[in-house]
Amino acid sequence: MTDQQPETSPVATWRAPGRVNLIGEHTDYNDGFTLPFAIAASCTATVRPGGDGLRAGSAQVDGEVAIPLTGLAEAPAVPDWARYVLGAAWLLRDRGVDVPPLEVTVDSDVPSGAGLSSSAAVVCSVVTALDDALGLGLAPDELLALSRAVENDVVGAPTGGMDQLASLRSREGHVLFCDMRDLAAEPVPFDLGGAGLALLVVDSRAPHAHADGEYAARRRGCEAAAAALGVPALRDVVIDDLDAALARLDGVGAEEQRRYTRHIVTEDARVLQTVELLRAGRVREIGPLLTQSHVSMRDDFRITVPEVDTAVEVLLAGGALGARMTGGGFGGCVIGLLEAEAVESAAAQVEEAFAEAGFTPPVAFTVTPGPGAHRVDG
Ligand code: ADP
Ligand code: MG
């Protein structure tokens, strides 16, 4: 893509969604499996060639940011939000694409920092709109790589690629079975309505205290455990070999390496079991796997906080088939698999429990699997 001379078309608008991860947490950087799907909350990006330099605007942020065409290197004080918005244009220029002066504006209803991947919604809507407006004809894996590079290299956020895969490639009515080793993604039917079920998302609104440092510590611990076991990544420990692997780690690594290994290996197995059940149309039966995933994140990986544990407990006590925290942890959202008619009372019960505990009021809404990035005509 480096030596292409893009033809400029007037304006392009694309919409890209946020996502919920049904199951498979922290497995991404262990080369393992995840199962995200796109939600209705999404970001719309419009690319308008013209003017001079690169200009960014967001309906959710006051003020515009303008940088010279030569890029971010000459405008070091660019805030993060504008790096998400302009990063792709800058990277393309850096790779030799003749990006013209242009304006990129975004408008998103994905809550920021709630674990629903507002960042990937911004980046993927911009990347697809740019590809369209500049007539680049990027292949799916190039769109993915560029979206990821904006987060990793321009913003400096160490995301593993799942968020961008989900935002770009999700399909309505399906979850996306992602193999994070080779970034392959396969849609698997997820028919909640047909099973009489609903998926409730509870945004705990708990502050993400120490999330970055804790994430880095989990990542280091997983890498150390894989090294001690002599495998490229924890994904290479299959569930049948878990006990032997844990025995080998006994006395070798720190105690947390055993816990981290147990979480990752059992979580990968749970993703695979979930996929099997969904392929067989047995949606109701995934509930216990969701709950086991939460217990594993709470007790072994230790990435939950009282707010999300409370939400899970209340949902389960109220009859949810399964419930778990979704996302990187230390706050963020919980999902509950519920009978469709139980949604309202479940949400009310969580709200009540949060009030009693003195937590910030949660925000609850249902989600269904929607489409990935697509062009908006108009
Ligand atoms: P998450 O992706 O889980 O919502 P992140 O920390 O990865 O959380 O991304 C949040 C960041 O993405 C925000 O701090 C902001 O920089 C950027 N962002 C998200 N939504 C918008 C938006 N509508 N306009 C501009 N920037 C946004
Ligand atoms: Mg993000």
Image (cartoon, helix red, strand yellow):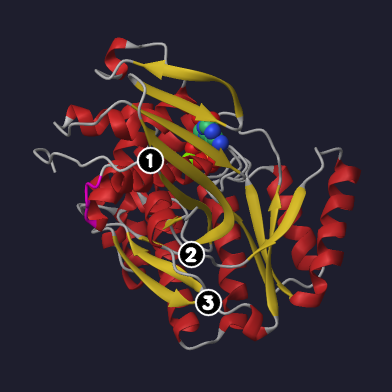
Mark 3 = which residue? 190
User: Which label sits in the foreground, 1 or 3?
Assistant: 3
Classify the position of the N terminus by image quarter: top left
Viewer-proximal residue among 140 and 133: 133
Mark 1 = which residue? 219
What is the three-letter code of the residue carrying label 2? Pro
User: Which label sits in the foreground, 2 or 1?
Assistant: 2
Q: CA distance from mark 1 to mark 3?
A: 30 Å
Q: Give the residue displayed 22% in from the left and 47% down from the top.
A: 136
Q: CA distance from mark 2 to mark 3?
A: 13 Å
Query: What is the x, y in percent for residue 182?
Result: 23, 59
User: Which label sits in the foreground, 2 or 3?
Assistant: 2
Indicate left or right for 256 with 181 as reference.
Answer: right
What is the three-letter code of the residue carrying label 1? Arg
Q: Which residues are magenta?
A: 135-139
Query: What is the x, y in percent for residue 32?
Result: 34, 59
Viewer-proximal residue among 36 and 12: 12
Q: Give the residue displayed 28% in from the left and 15% down from the top.
A: 73
Q: Earlier in the sequence, mark 1 or mark 3?
A: 3
Q: Earlier in the sequence, mark 2 or mark 3?
A: 3
Q: CA distance from mark 2 to mark 1?
A: 31 Å
Mark 2 = which residue? 371
SS state under label 3: loop
Q: Give the residue displayed 62% in from the left and 77% down from the top.
A: 192
The 10 Å Cα crowd at callout 1, few under 14, some 14 to 19, many 20 or more, is: some
